[in-house]
Image (cartoon, helix red, strand yellow):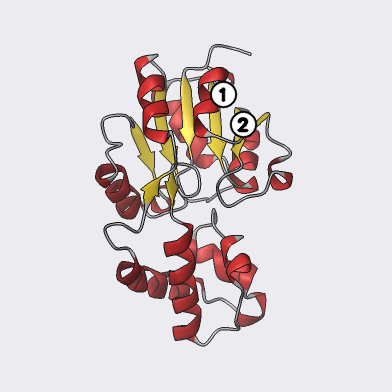
Amino acid sequence: MSRIKNIILDFDGTLGDTASVIIQTMQATIGELGLPQRSDEECAAMIGLRLIEIPKVLFPECGDIGELYAETYRRLFYAFNTDEAVKLYPNVLSTLEELKRRGITLTIASSRSHASLAGYVDSLGLSPLISYVLGADDVKEGKPNPEAVNRTLAIFHFKAEESIVVGDTAYDIQMGKNAGTWTCGVTYGNGSRESLADADWVIDDFSELLALT
């Protein structure tokens, strides 16, 4: 294993605990659009996909409604995204600070829109620690396509073997695998340990990242 120089982080379910606000917004979107009912668990399983891609997985019988779903979700999201709705998971901030102190470049690749992602990075105090942010609208292809990872590597001139992709879903892990990076799954977010089985490492607490660098 080469010395790790770069960590590419997912946001939802990895850094920020956004599950509640996402599921509330999804259920409100489903209700407003009159879509077939889905359980909270089924909604949570969609976290990691871009909004426009969710309907073809969650509502395959409803045709091409990706744009309508995404537009409705974004409008309703602001009603649920109160100031205290999203918090960092335990040990995230202190671990990122230590990784930064060690000289490791920290970036984010998320399926959330760039504006929403940047807002969280700022409001949660992560701006001084994160060197680069890619949202869903910054790339042509969403996870598990490796576009976001490849762009990050190219911009900073890192080799794939010098980087780790960290995330809570199989989409994150497969994105890293497709780019040739190391991968690390976190069990406290929206994915199960079983769904992260392909990762090079699986950790139960964000602070365990320190042992991998």
Query: Is 31 on the left or on the right of 135, as rendered?
Result: right
Disc 2 target residue: 183
Residue type at mark 1 is Ala
How far apart in space, not on screen, are marks 2 and 1 (Cα)? 11 Å
User: In this orientation, which residue lies closer to the viewer: 89 or 200?
Assistant: 89
Disc 1 target residue: 160
Q: Tell me the crowding category of disc 1: few under 14, some 14 to 19, or many 20 or more residues within 10 angstroms, Cα based.
A: many
Task: Give the x, y percent position of residue 124.
Answer: 29, 43
Residue type at mark 2 is Thr
User: In this orientation, which residue lies closer to the viewer: 142 or 24?
Assistant: 24
Task: Give the x, y percent position of residue 76.
Answer: 35, 73
Seen in the picture, residue 66 relative to 97 is either above or below; the reply is below
**Can you tell which quarter of the image residue 46 is in?**
bottom right
Q: Tell me the crowding category of disc 2: few under 14, some 14 to 19, or many 20 or more residues within 10 angstroms, Cα based.
A: many
Eye-nearest disc, 2 or 1? 2
Q: Residue at x 25, y 43 (%)?
A: 122
